[in-house]
Amino acid sequence: MSPVGLSCYSRWLSRFKTIYSQSTVVSFSSTATTTAPPNENETPLSRPAPPPIRVALTESAGRGVFATRRIGAGDTIHSAKPLVSHPSLAAINTVCYFCLKKIQTFSGSQRQGVSLCCEKCKESSKVFYDVEKRADWLDFDDYCRTEGMKYPLLVKRLACMVISGAAQANIVDILQPASLTQEMILKMEEGFCLLQCAFSKANIRKEHTSFLTKQWYTAVLARIRINAFRIDLAGGVYEDLLSLAAASVEAESAVGNAIYMLPSFYNHDCDPNTHIIWIENADAKLKALHDIEEGEELRICYIDASLSCDARQSILSQGFGFKCNCLRCLSGD
C-alpha cells in the first residue's frame, strides 16, 4: 500500500487564512496546549526538546508548518493534546469520557453514568464535568442525535470549561471560521437555545454564563466546523509507520471529535508528507510519511486521499472553501 493510500483518514481542519503579521513565526512546546509556569528545579537538559518545526507564513495558504531540520521517514514530529474533545453519542458508553480511550473491561472510575478510564482522567474531567453534571442534557443530546450533529457537543463541553474557569471564552478565536449560510445559522439557533436553557434550569449563575450569547455560540461552532478532527483510534503498539497508518485506515469507527491548536496550522496536500494518528486516546501524534528536508512545509491530507481528483476537489471546495492546487491534483491523479 502506498503512503497516499495509507493517508486515508477522516480529518476536519482549517487552513489558517488570517494573516496577523508579515513576519509571523510561532514556536510551540512538544506536547502541551497550555502554558505552565517555569519550574525552578528544571534544568535545560531536563526539559523536553521542542519539536523540529516552526509556524510561518506560506506564499499562498496563510500560515503553515515548516521543518527546522531534516526529519526522517517514520519519525514522530510532535504530539498534541486536545483543547477540547467529546466522545460521539454512539460511543459514549464504550470510551473514557475524558480521553476517549476505549474501555473494554471497565476498571476505572464512573461518574453518574459516564466512564473514566483512570483516576487521572477522573481528576482531569473536573474542568468540565463538575459543571456539566448539574444540568439535564437529555433534550440537547436528543437534538444532536436527531439532527446528526456532533460539533454542538464540543461547544457544550467548552462552555462548561469556561463556566468552571478552566478555559477562556475566546480560546478558539485564533482558528479560522467556516463561512456560514443563513440557513446554517438558523439551524444553529435551536442548539444555542437548548444549551442556554440547560444552564438556566441548572441554576448556573448568570454572571458565569454572560459569555454565552448567540454570537459566541455561532462563532465557536463555525470554527469547530472546519477545525475539528474525527478521532479514529488505531489501538495497540506499532513498530513502523506503515502498520500504524494501516491501522488508522482500518479503525472500526470514530470514537469522538477534538480540537487542537498546533495541528490546526498544518495545510493540506492530497499527497501529504505528514500523517496524524491516534493510538489509544485523543492525544494526537504527527509522523513523517517520508523524509522531510529543513525548510520544507509539512502538510497533511484533510480528507480521504484515495478518492478521485474530482471527488477530492468537490469535498475540499464545499467543506473547506478552497481549490486544491497540489501537484497531484494538477496532474489529475
Image (cartoon, helix red, strand yellow):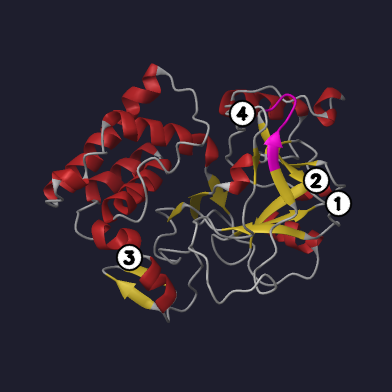
Q: Residue at x 79, y 49 (%)?
A: 68
Three-letter residue code for mark 2 = Asn
Binning the other alpha carbons within 10 Å of mark 1 as few (below 14), some (14 to 19) or many (20 upward) gives some
3 vs 4, front mark: 4
Callout 3 secondary element: helix
Distance CA(mark 3)–CA(mark 1) = 40 Å
For disc 3, the marked residue is 126
Callout 2 secondary element: loop
Distance CA(mark 4)–CA(mark 1) = 31 Å
Sequence-wise, the earlier of marks 3 and 4 is 4
Looking at the rendering, the stretch of residues picked out in magenta corresponds to 55-61
Q: Residue at x 70, y 25 (%)?
A: 313
Distance CA(mark 3)–CA(mark 4) = 37 Å
Callout 1 secondary element: loop
2 vs 4, front mark: 4
Sequence-wise, the earlier of marks 4 and 1 is 4
For disc 4, the marked residue is 21
The reply to whether dot 2 and dot 1 touch (C-beta < 8 Å) is yes
With respect to residue 86, does 106 lie above or below?
Answer: below
Callout 4 secondary element: loop
Sequence-wise, the earlier of marks 3 and 2 is 3
Three-letter residue code for mark 1 = His
